[in-house]
Image (spheres, rainbow, N blue to C red):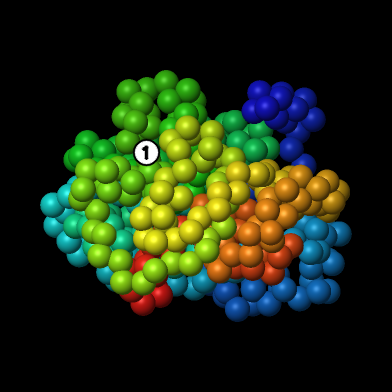
Amino acid sequence: MRRHQIHRAKRDGVPLTRRLTTQTDLIGKLASLAPAVMNFANRNRPSRILMEKTVGIHRDWVQPRYYGKTVERWWKGRGPRVEGANGRVVLFTTCSVNYSDPSTARALVEVLERSDVRVDVEYQRCCGMPQSDTGQLDRVRQSAERNVADLLPYVEAGASIVVPGPACSLLMKNEYPKLLKTESAEKVAGAVQDAMEYLYQLARAKQMNRDFEKTLGRVAYHAPCHLRAQNIGFRARDLLKLAGAEVEVVDACSGVDGTWGMQARHHQASLGVAEAMLRRIREFEPDDVSTDCPLAALRIKESLGIEAVHPIVLLHRAYGMAAS
């Protein structure tokens, strides 16, 4: 699929509107300067109709919420708080979490620290997945080169790279070495782990704090396609069960596929792909819905009106810690 996208991009070019939608860092940085304005525009019907006609994003697609206090800004005033007797990680937040879901990053940091894992945060730019989706290989390679340079010092100091978004963790694990063909890229790729994968390994080593104070209820857990492709198992399911949840795994596609499903011309087809996922969530009648994929969470919000949270947010709640 990637080879086809790259070929098509070379043959036909990438439309300006699609190039704009892949500028996630630029959009996030601008939105974080005036989040109230951006959030209002993203929920205002006339502006959404205008967006559909100009940029091609369907008027009913739920846009992410933006925050002024990004993970970067929060971290500058906080920093590491434990020495790390049980390990050290560097959190690569992803653009989605940094600008639109900072509570997931804060929950992850606090859960890791509860098990005496030292956390540093390093995020300067997108992993490159949006550009990969549109066949812009040169831009993906540029992001890979710069991210490898930023993350390598942490890896050489013994840290694992923990990523809360499966699209990014898959790209960094599998594609960075192929794109760059360097020893540094191999080292960084070898240190990348999905957030719940890392926590599961911590639990297996009996180093994870298991003093849960609240029992979780019925959780419909959507397992993203990019996570299943990593062949690491349903670690979020395992950890949520450890915290007392009754978990229904929903291993069906959300139909978003990067920017494809949010485009007006593909929106109806995208909803058709998502129907199996949505039906299984409805039938389970959960207390909470969880997914590691931010785009799947937006599809669930759009179609079911339910806020789907990252599984680390539910673990954070199970510990009895206040919402971050």
Looking at the image, which residue is at 44% across and 50% down? 236
Residue 203, position as x, y percentages in the image = 27, 48
Left or right: 34, with 199 as reference point:
right
The number of discs equals 1
Looking at the image, which residue is at 59% across and 31% down? 137
Q: Looking at the figure, which quarter contains the N terminus?
A: top right
Depth check: give the residue in front, 199 or 35.
199
Q: Looking at the figure, which quarter contains the C terminus?
A: bottom left
Residue 164, position as x, y percentages in the image = 44, 51
Q: Is 162 placed above or below 155 here?
A: below
Depth check: give the residue in front, 265 or 115.
115
Judge whether residue 55 can be spotted in this image: no
Looking at the image, which residue is at 20% across and 50% down? 207
What residue type is disc 1 on? Answer: Val
Look at the numbered disc 1 and give the secondary structure of its residue: strand
Depth check: give the residue in front, 233 or 110.
233
The residue under label 1 is 192
Looking at the image, which residue is at 31% across and 29% down? 187
Residue 97, position as x, y percentages in the image = 49, 59
Left or right: 19, with 139 as reference point:
right
Residue 301, position as x, y percentages in the image = 67, 65
Left or right: 244, with 68 as reference point:
left
